[in-house]
Amino acid sequence: MSVHLGLDLGATNLKWSVVEHGPDGWRAIDRGQLPTDVSGGADATVAQLGDVAGGIIHGHPAVSTIGIGVPGAYDPGTGRTRFLPNVPGDWAGRPVAAPVRAATGLPTALINDARAFGLAELRVGAARGARTMVGLTLGTGVGGAVAIAGRIHLGLDGAAGEIGHQTLEPEGLPCTCGNRGCLEAYARADRIATLCGTSSVEEAVRRATAGDARAMDGLAEVGRWLGIGIANLVVLLTPERVVIGGGVAGAGDLLLAPIRRELGARVRMTSLERVRIVVAELGTWAGSVGAAIHGAEAGTRRGTSRAAGKQDDHAAAAGSGGDRGGSGRDG
């Protein structure tokens, strides 16, 4: 049995989960949250990550790795953030993994928070058992994750899976990323509220569930755009599972039905019979659980790489010695 810590950094709250991994798979054993310290910019926030991790490890001394989910772009090679658009402070090139590692003495790895969400749903949530998955988390923006062969695909720089930033309309609505016509521009929280005539996504879901016509039409419009984007991914990946997370997923079939209709209208190159569109199961804790799993799996890969490197070194040394001996015998 191994134990791992995941931290989910948000602009408002810092969530954490302790998970254990054993013969029966993954299981969360503790969790909590506290307000994110943004009072002193990035320095204060990074210091808080180290302090919080240290306190949790004091209560769970068996923790062996740490994963941190960050709401933005990062460099997986250096453990530095590139930009976190919603967290106050200067995050360009900011070391995050190294200070937390120094504070705790434990291997620490970063992952984008949407990829952490996808990893958690893949391992212990709505996509468990699937080998290929598409995950979308709908909130301030539209985050995404793609799993191939049972693993979250991170790409060259951890940015693979940005489903919300595929272009659906070349000259469409402006997106916060600087492009026009991204899926996110049609399905992010403020757009949902505008279409539904409400002040928030939560209110939109409540009104639509109660039968409010405008709210229902707004969710149907959002579902149509999501369906177009998901149809592109189904044709590309033929996933077994498509997982929809975030507050608006609470609308259930009011959102999922128009997504399924759009898939039926657009997907022609593969069968939809085995593609399941489902609601995420882990709620607000998916990010911290996924970060913990990522930290564990990253640590395992590093250990495997080091072991393989040592084996290669031993083999090279043995081979070199054998060549010298053979050369002597030939002489």
Image (spheres, rainbow, N blue to C red):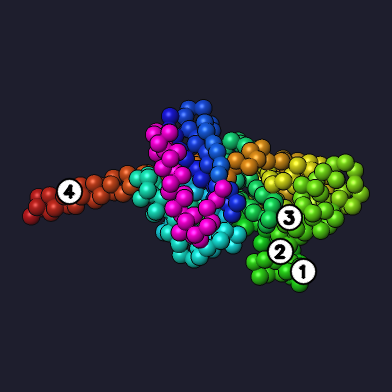
Q: Residues within 10 Å of mark 4 (few under 14, many from 20)?
A: few
What residue is pinned by disc 2?
182
The image position of residue 197, as x and y in percent, is 85, 55
Residue that appears at 80% across and 51% down: 223
**Closer to viewer: mark 3 or mark 4:** 3
**Closer to viewer: mark 3 or mark 1:** 3
Instruction: Give the dominant element type of the magenta stretch: helix, strand or loop.
Output: helix
Among the two numbered marks 2 and 3 on one chain, the one whose residue lies closer to the N terminus: 2
Element at label 2:
loop
The image position of residue 66, as x and y in percent, is 44, 44
**Is residue 112 left or right of 279 when viewed as pictured?**
left
Residue that appears at 45% across and 59% down: 43
Please give the range of residues in magenta. 35-64
The amino acid on which the numbered mark 4 sits, given as a three-letter code, is: Gly
Among the two numbered marks 3 and 1 on one chain, the one whose residue lies closer to the N terminus: 1
Element at label 1:
loop
Q: Nearer the viewer, residue 51 or 99?
A: 51
Q: Nearer the viewer, residue 158 or 210?
A: 210
Q: Residues within 10 Å of mark 3 (few under 14, many from 20)?
A: many
Which mark, residue 322? 4
Q: Nearer the viewer, residue 321 or 233?
A: 233
Residue 252, located in which quarter of the rendered image? top right
Residue that appears at 77% across and 52% down: 200
Q: Residues at badges 1 and 2 in contact (C-beta under 8 Å)?
A: yes
Among the two numbered marks 4 and 1 on one chain, the one whose residue lies closer to the N terminus: 1
Q: Magenta stretch containing residue 49, yes or no?
A: yes
Q: Residues at badges 2 and 4 in contact (C-beta under 8 Å)?
A: no
